[in-house]
Amino acid sequence: MIETMAFDTADAGPARNARTRPGWLARLPWRTGEDWERPGPTRTQQRHDVIGTIILLLISALVMEVSRGIGALAGETGPIWFQHLALALIILPLVVRRRYPVAVMLICSAVFLGLGLLVPMVATQTSFQAAYFASLYTAVAWAKDRRILWLGTTVVIAVMALWVILSFTVSSAYDGMLERIMEGDDSYRGFLPPLASLALYNLAINAAFFGGAIMFGMSAWRSAHQRELLVKQSAQLELQATELARQAVLDERLRIARELHDVVAHHIAVIGVQAGAARRVLEKKPEATAGALQTIEASSREAVEQMRSLLGVLRAGEEPGSESDGGARRTPEPGLADLPALVAEHEQLGLSVSYHRSEDVPGSLDRVPAPLGLSIYRTVQESLANVRRHSTAGSAVVALRTGTTGTGKSWAEVETVDNGRPRTGSTAGSGFGIRGIRERADLHGGTTEIGPRSGGGWRVRVRFPLH
């Protein structure tokens, strides 16, 4: 009861690496974790040790006086003050039992040996033996240097074994047994001879005493080690979760940046082309000018709506959307089904586009996932916008197809080609469009082929694996 209340071993501080122990000893099952060094006790644990020691000392003194009242100490001839001093000498070192565990074990062992010979009746008190048990237990549970611990434990057990052997020569019970055996006392009849029975009895008691202290100490030490491992694993998992969350934010920002670039580049290119056409025919063909301005108006509105949709995604984590948010709520993203409308839009702007679909298995394009469909749509959108901005080509070909590799893996591929030359006076662009295409391909584990064709013109080919 006292040990459970006052001498807890539940708390364990952060681990510190001790010296490693190579060789076959380090691989033994009972040596698992022996390279871990348990930290010293906290202030709270040291305070518990002081309070527990004082309580144990007071209870031990009371119990010893009660034992004296019932005659349990009748054979003790030493003075009463010396008997209480003997109890105090073995209990008081427990104040620093977790701070200096091996030293306390050695001190208590020496006190146990000396007082066991001087005041043998006091040494049989439960509190006396419980204090010694606590010193053994604490040494095994809290020792930092395990080699010194096992060396000290081996010395203590060897000395105690020698003490048990010597106690046969000084024990009054042993002398009385010999006298009654010599007188023919029949009460000493058993399965084994009396002397052998006494020796086995003392061996079993001491084996249970020392073995139990070592076993419980090792259990407490391993529990502290396991708790420290769990704490470190928990901290590692928390760090990984934080890193994953940060990476998710970066990925989302990159996705939105790609979407904004594609939307702005496409619609600004349309607006620029139509504005130039309107300027040229402003006086000669007012009807054509009106049509160009209508296209500019429609394209600008669509660009603003799509930008609001993307920006609404950024605001979604800060505040809930409202019905009057100006269209900032996210709209459905385009996919493969929107490619014909994209092609028709560019044809209305003066670029002749041929669109072809081919499937190795009927319906395979309909089973393309929505994220992959969006990447294909943005790839075609950026490719056609680049043709109109940077090429003299008046036509382009868009081919969407599926197939199977020699290993049986399916793929979807989109290819955009033209036969023009770089437009004179056109800027080279920022390169973000081509970079965005490659990033989308990498996101889905695809491959890209972007560059000039051998016979003239430009090719953008992206192949995505289908799972």
Image (cartoon, rainbow, N blue to C red):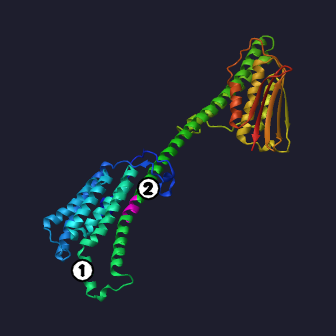
Q: Earlier in the sequence, mark 2 or mark 1?
A: 1
What residue is shown at x 33% (from left), y 65% (from top)? 161
The residue carrying mark 2 is 222
Q: Position of residue 450 (x, y in %)?
A: 76, 26
Q: Is residue 458 left or right of residue 312?
A: right
What residue is shown at x 83% (from left), y 41% (from top)? 406
Q: Is residue 196 left or right of residue 288?
A: left
Q: Quadrant of residue 198?
A: bottom left
Q: Position of residue 428 (x, y in %)?
A: 71, 17
Label number found at residue 176: 1
Q: Quadrant of residue 465?
A: top right
Q: Which residues lie in the magenta part?
A: 212-217
Q: Position of residue 121 (x, y in %)?
A: 22, 71
Q: Is residue 42 left or right of residue 83?
A: right
Q: Is residue 287 left or right of residue 163?
A: right
Q: Of helix, strand and loop, which one carries label 1?
A: helix
Q: Of helix, strand and loop, which one carries label 2?
A: helix
Using a 10 Å C-alpha cutoff, classify the residue at mark 2 as few (fewer than 14 neighbours), some (14 to 19) or many (20 or more): some
Q: In this picture, is 167 found above or below 374?
A: below
